[in-house]
Image (spheres, helix red, strand yellow):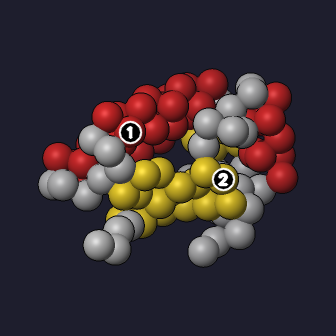
Amino acid sequence: MSQEYQLIHVEVAELDLLSSQELQGQTTSCIEAGQIHIIIDLSEVQIIKSSGIGTLVAILKRIQQEQGNLKLIGLRPPILEVFKIANLKNMFELHSKVL
């Protein structure tokens, strides 16, 4: 059976506390609707705060509990570097290009 992914496009330059809460709400709605395979497009994000990282980790854990998959796409080099520094690069399925 093929997995259909729900695309969520983050339309902010800074993934901070406020925008992270909005993203959390979007993904929670998807999961509650049975959409457990999610792609989050971060191509517009230029800065990611610790609250943004924490939210992405929480989203990943929730999706994994539901036996789903999470892909992060469109990561700019500075954002990808944050994942490397935080030792999270292997935890997430990361793509610098939009799929």
Residue 33 falls left or right of residue 87: left
The residue at the point 73 percent across, 62 percent down is: 96
| Residue 90 occupies quadrant | top right
Relative depth, front residue between 93 and 52: 93
Image x and y of residue 19, in percent: 47, 41
**The furthest residue to the left:** 33
- Front label number (2 vs 1): 1
Residue 37 falls left or right of residue 94: left
Q: Looking at the image, is mark 2 or mark 1 earlier in the sequence?
A: 1
**The furthest residue to the front:** 1
Label 2 crowding class (10 Å Cα cut-off): few <14, some 14-19, many 20+? some
Identified by mark 1, the residue type is Gln
Marks 2 and 1, how far apart at CA? 16 Å
Q: How many marks?
A: 2
Element at badge 2? strand
Image x and y of residue 2, in percent: 34, 74
Image x and y of residue 41, in percent: 55, 61
Q: Which mark is residue 64?
A: 1
| Residue 59 occupies quadrant | top left
Image quadrant holding the C terminus, namely bottom right
